[in-house]
């Protein structure tokens, strides 16, 4: 119970949700790359800004109500009402009237991978500092 409170009072829940977001977005981008030459395929993506606004609102609520009163576990990217996968019309228009751009998809994939790696590193450092505090070590 002490460890759970210690972890949930910091930024770890936020970073975990953003990590889940980048993972889900990576799956959607990879799916779009795999189907780039599929006629009639409609690319889907997640709304990053919308998800971040949702997280900020939850943080404000947690600040107002106090530590441990508000959780983040129900914010699952791709779920109904939470950063749902939406159709996007980016790219070059092909003969089947569908927009595609391999370059844009690869750029999105790289950008998303960098963000994902950053969130992994932030989470690792936060857990490392908690571990050091529990061992009574100074980093």
Image (cartoon, helix red, strand yellow):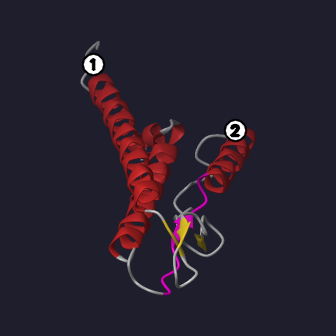
Q: Which mark is residue 63?
A: 2
Residue sitting nearer the eye, 34 or 63: 34
Q: Which residue is mark 1?
A: 136
Classed neighbour count for the residue bearing mark 2: other residues with Cα under 10 Å, few (<14), some (14–19), many (≥20): some
User: Residue shown at 25%/16% (left/top)?
Assistant: 137
Question: From the viewer's perspective, is 36 left or right of 10?
Answer: left
Q: Secondary structure at mark 1?
A: loop
Residue 89 locus on image (x, y percent): 61, 69
Question: From the viewer's perspective, is 135 left or right of 118?
Answer: left
- 56 lies above or below 139: below
First in residue order: circle 1 vs circle 2:
2
Residue sitting nearer the eye, 7 or 43: 43
Residue 63 covered by magenta stretch: no
Residue 56 locus on image (x, y percent): 67, 45
Q: Which mark is residue 47?
A: none
Residue 134 locus on image (x, y percent): 29, 27
Residue sitting nearer the eye, 116 or 86: 86
Residue sitting nearer the eye, 89 or 110: 89
Classed neighbour count for the residue bearing mark 1: other residues with Cα under 10 Å, few (<14), some (14–19), many (≥20): few
User: Residue shown at 69%/49% (left/top)?
Assistant: 53
Question: From the viewer's perspective, is 54 left or right of 121?
Answer: right
Q: Residue furthest top?
A: 138
- 43 lies above or below 112: below
Quadrant hosting residue 115: top left
User: Residue shown at 45%/86% (left/top)?
Assistant: 39
Q: Secondary structure at mark 2?
A: helix
Question: From the viewer's perspective, is 5 left or right of 106?
Answer: right
The residue range painted magenta reads 40-48
């Amino acid at each position: 119970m002490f460890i759970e409170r210690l972890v949930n009072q910091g930024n770890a829940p936020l970073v975990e949700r953003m990590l889940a977001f980048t993972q889900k977005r990576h799956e959607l981008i990879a799916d779009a790359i795999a189907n780039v030459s599929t006629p009639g395929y409609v690319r889907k993506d997640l709304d990053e800004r919308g998800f971040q606004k949702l997280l900020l609102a939850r943080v404000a609520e947690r600040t107002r109500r106090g530590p441990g009163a508000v959780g983040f576990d129900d914010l699952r990217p791709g779920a109904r009402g939470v950063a749902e996968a939406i159709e996007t019309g980016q790219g070059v228009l092909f003969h089947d009237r569908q927009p595609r751009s391999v370059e844009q998809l690869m750029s999105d994939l790289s950008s998303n991978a960098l963000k994902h790696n950053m969130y992994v590193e932030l989470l690792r450092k936060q857990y490392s500092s908690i571990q050091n505090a529990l061992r009574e070590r100074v980093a």
